[in-house]
Image (tube, rainbow, N blue to C red):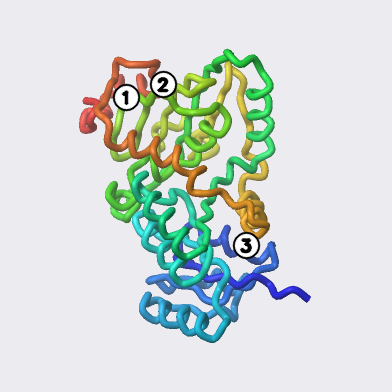
Amino acid sequence: MNTPPRFALIGVGGFVAPRHLRAIKEVGGALEVALDPNDSVGIMDSYFPQARFFTEFERFDRYIDLCRRRGEGVDFMSICSPNYLHDSNVRFALRSGADAICEKPLVLNPHNIDGLQTLEEETGRKVNTILQLRLHPTIIALREKILSGPKDAVADVSLTYVTSRGRWYHSSWKGDEAKSGGIATNIGVHFYDMLSFVFGDLVRNVVHYRAADRAAGYLEYERARVRWFLSINIDDVPPAVREKQSTFRSITVDGEEIEFSDGFTDLHTASYREVIAGRGFSLAEVRPSIATVAHIRNAPLEPDEGEAHPFLATVLASGEGRNDERA
């Protein structure tokens, strides 16, 4: 009988951690130990009530080291901590003799990937990142359609993602750009990865608008022109939709809506299966999306370059953009 893979989890009290707990359970893994500075982690009872839990990194570190010295070290360390801690936590995983499974964004800047690549080579361990949209059947089918189409075809794409957040967001680490990477990084990085996965290399990246709660711009890939708009402001949810829900997600390709809501929550389990099989997404695969969001965060605004998203015109016309960089 094969021994189930052993896991540790950093950030078990976070928003995305339940997806990782479920994935570990569904792939037959065993959670040995978890860490979070907050102790509101009763969700563990639904999956691994016998797992050790620490609120202090030092005690967690000591336990991981003790297990390793006994020959009972963890095989994988799942990382669900705040974005700015991902790089450090991944390094800890590799140095502890475990492969890392890290939530998006893997890191905040492309140069951080270089350091992780060096550490992979030194330790012989692997960094795996969650790029779940690459595993979605609808996205895979779209990619195959684009790749099988005319070589010189360039699609017109519109990406709109509004996922409203309350005032707490701006008081948490997510509202601190130095810790979250800003809106494009925190809520959009997996969409940029999806775009490069489907449409090829990025050749142009124009930023039209950047604020604490919204961002917009224009991208050109080998096979697509993309106008995009991201927001956590509920006012950006279309009124007809707002009556039913507080989020709005739309991706159109040449005017055709790409629907991929179904099965979205199951993709972490699929990601874990790929990791355990040795097919997890690598540092090289995550680099383009990290470079994209780093540019969006730091580039000068060019409001007159490329095609603007129609939602941006509505924001500017309303006067709500007066305190942002665009105004």
Q: Where is mark 1, residue-wise? A: 208
- Residue 240 vertical position relative to residue 16 in the rendered view, above or below: above
- Closer-to-camera residue (301/16): 301
Q: Is residue 74 left or right of residue 293?
A: right
> Which mark is first along the chain, 2 or 3?
3
> Which mark is first along the chain, 3 or 1?
3
- Closer-to-camera residue (242/206): 206
Q: Position of residue 117 (x, y in %)?
A: 43, 53
> Which mark is first along the chain, 2 or 1?
1
Q: Is residue 94 left or right of residue 312?
A: right
Q: Are marks 3 and 2 in contact (CB under 8 Å)?
A: no
In space, the residues marked 3 and 2 are separated at their CA atoms by 37 Å
Q: Are marks 1 and 2 in contact (CB under 8 Å)?
A: yes
Q: Position of residue 32 (x, y in %)?
A: 56, 77
Q: Which mark is residue 60?
A: none
The amino acid at mark 2 is His
* Residue in the picture at 69% in, 38% down: 137
Can residue 227 be seen in this snapshot?
A: yes
Point out the frontmost of discs 1 and 2.
1
Q: Which mark is residue 309?
A: 2
Can residue 188 be seen in this snapshot?
A: no
Instruction: Residue at the far right: name it.
Output: 1
